[in-house]
Structure formats: structure tokens, C-alpha cells
Amino acid sequence: MKFSTIGKKLVLATAGGLVLGSVLLGAPSPVSVTGSATVAGDPSVTFMAKCASCHAKDGSGNTAAGKKMGVKDLRSAEVQGMSDAQLTDIIGKGKGKMPGYHKSLGADGVKEQVAYIRSMK
């Protein structure tokens, strides 16, 4: 498979022919060719897609699902006091009912989420 652009069209050359699609040149693509789940390098977008339904967009855990499962407030001294390695392990492998995200985010995506949680202080 080979990607290239012609004018404002994205061209995907495959064994079966060409596929054309419109793109905005110069804008970050929300779809990653490498398969990383981090959207356009913005960890807040990934957090909203994968974490906010339980942890809330502000990290408080103040959602119906978060309350039901007793998730931690990501802004709390308890969570913020964890080491990066501990947070990486929890995000990557999961904990309790929370699934692990290492396969979908990759090591860099997990690191980005740790940094994002740190920004919630």
C-alpha cells in the first residue's frame, strides 16, 4: 500500500487499484497510519475517547459508571502521588474492571496518558 496526495485528494495505491479521498492538506489527520490510538498526538482526545466515560473529562470520576465502580479521582493526592511506573502499569495492564490499553495505545500513548493525568493536578 502506498499513500500520496494529488491536489487535495489522498491517493491510496493498492494491488486492486486506487482509492481517492478528500483531505485537508496541512491539517493533522485524526487517523493514524501507524495504528496508534492517540489521535493526532493529542492525549486529551484519547482521554475523552477511552477514559472520560468512567473518570469524567476532568478526571474526578464523577460519572454514573465511575461512581458505580468507585474509580479514583485522578486529581487526588493518592493518584498524583503514584510513580509514573505505577500509573503506566495501571493504564497499560488495567486494574479491576478497567481494561488495559497497552495494545491499543502502545508504550508512547500510555506515557502520554500518564503525562495528561499529571496535568490534572
Image (tube, helix red, strand yellow):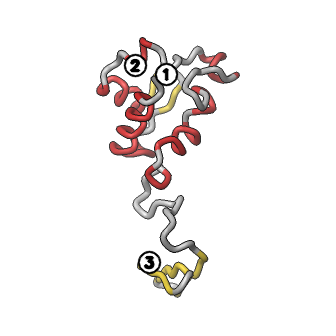
Residue 78 lies, in percent from the top left, at 42, 12
Mark 2 or mark 3, which is nearer the start of the sequence?
3
Indicate the secondary structure of the residue bearing disc 1.
loop
Name the residue tied to disc 2.
80
Q: Which one is in front in this view, the residue at disc 3 or the one at disc 2?
A: 2
Callout 1–callout 2 Cβ contact below 8 Å: yes
Q: Amino acid at mark 3?
A: Phe
Q: Is residue 90 left or right of residue 74?
A: left
Residue lying at the far top in this picture: please name it.
78
Residue that extends furthest to the right in the rendered view of this protein: 64
**Neighbours of disc 1 within 10 Å: few (<14), some (14-19), many (20+):** many
| Front in this rendered view, residue 69 or 118 | 118
Q: Please, is residue 25 above or below residue 55 in the view?
A: below
Q: What residue type is disc 2 on?
A: Gln
Give me the residue at 60% from left, 76% from top. 22
Circle 1 residue:
74
Residue carrying label 3: 3
On residue 101, which mark appears? none
